[in-house]
Amino acid sequence: MGLGRPARAFVGMLVAAVLPLSVAAVAQSQSAAAERFDCQGLAEQGPPESALGWLERSLWANHCYEFRARAVRIGVDGVRSVALSHDVMEGVEREVAKFLDGSPVVFERRGRIGRLSWAEGDAPVPASPAGIAEHLDGLYRLQLSGEARLANRTTIRLDIESLDGLRYGHRFWLDTATGLPLKQVLLDERGRVVETFQITELHQPQLYQGEIGLDRRRPRPHDPWRPAWLPTGFIPLPVETHSARQGDDITHRVYSDGLATLSLFVEPVEGADQLIPGLHRLGASHAAVRHRELGGQLRQVMAMGELPPGVLLRVADTVEWQDGRKSSDGAGSEGEVP
């Protein structure tokens, strides 16, 4: 199936944290004015005492450790081996994932630690929610499930269970020395394994000796549309989504609950480069496509992500057009997907 322009824009690193969340225990100023994170604060911490603490430690480890690794990904499209690298140069991260078999594919990302929200005037825009426990509370249940040995390293298993059936569950095996995830299992709403990603070799991870900058403040875009419904806890991410490969008529926004991510594309239906309405499988992700009359024109709406198909279909079906009004990224009523 040819996925066209929107699908080609939906790429990302395999082991990057989807939403950089703050670590309350890190020896780092949490003031709104802080614009950089000192990775050396991780070296001063003892082992986390809770499941949430391990999750927070892992998210920061993804930013602060430089490493080379080999991994395997097991999904609906089979087994593929991957070479991974993560470096930091003058406070800017560079991640590369290169598939070593099958079609030659390389993903590369450069950037800084993302912020939680769009900039609103002079108001502070921190790197994360003021309280991560409050954000995840009611969405997931976190618990530790003992130790195991992977890639010749000791790991602790972290189980993350969805509480509402509107998002997938996760299992992480975290390196006890660094917090880096050495194995990740994605579970659908019925508890079935969707995808497994496991590092088989981790070569001498080193903590970056310096600070990593926060992404620049980004003003909220004023789109003429908005999702009228999103699952509880999903918030808009202030990320740059426009690509030179896309025309100005394609708008793309990203939403996350801290673990799951949803991409939403809206564009006019014209030409041959369109998708068939319905549900499409993209590895561990799905894409829900609708052709709808919005703003006096037939438009293609596509919701993509590692989420239950019913959730993506409902999001695509409830996108609203707001002629002449500023878009508020807020969602309407929340509840079970029919």
Image (cartoon, rainbow, N blue to C red):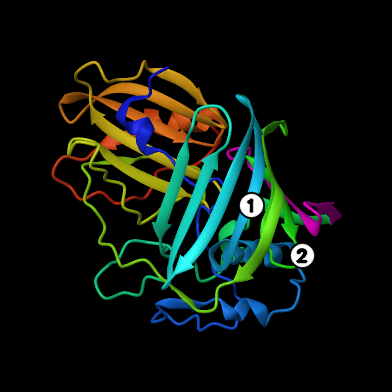
Q: What is the three-letter code of the residue carrying label 2?
A: Thr
Q: Which residue is mark 1?
A: 69
Q: Position of residue 105 (x, y in %)?
A: 47, 35
Q: Which mark is residue 14?
A: none
Q: Is residue 188 visible?
A: no
**Image coordinates for residue 102, horizontal then vertical, percent:** 55, 27
In the image shown, does 171 or 228 lie closer to the viewer?
171
Tell me if residue 325 comes above or below residue 61 in the rendering. above
Three-letter amino acid code of the residue under disc 1: Ala
Q: In which quarter of the view is residue 153 placed?
A: bottom right
Residue tagged 2: 176
Q: Residue at position x 36%, y 50% from top? A: 330
Task: Using residue 50 as the reference point, say whether residue 210 is left or right of it.
Answer: left
In the rendered image, the quadrant that contains the N terminus is top left
Q: Is residue 66 visible?
A: yes
> Magenta residues, as a range?
146-167
Residue 66 lies in the magenta-colored region? no
Q: Count residues near mark 2 (Cα–Cα under 10 Å), then give few for <14, some for 14-19, many for 20+.
A: some
Q: Position of residue 43 (x, y in %)?
A: 66, 79
Q: What main secondary structure does the magenta stretch of the protein show?
A: strand
Residue nearest the observer in this picture, 33 or 183: 183
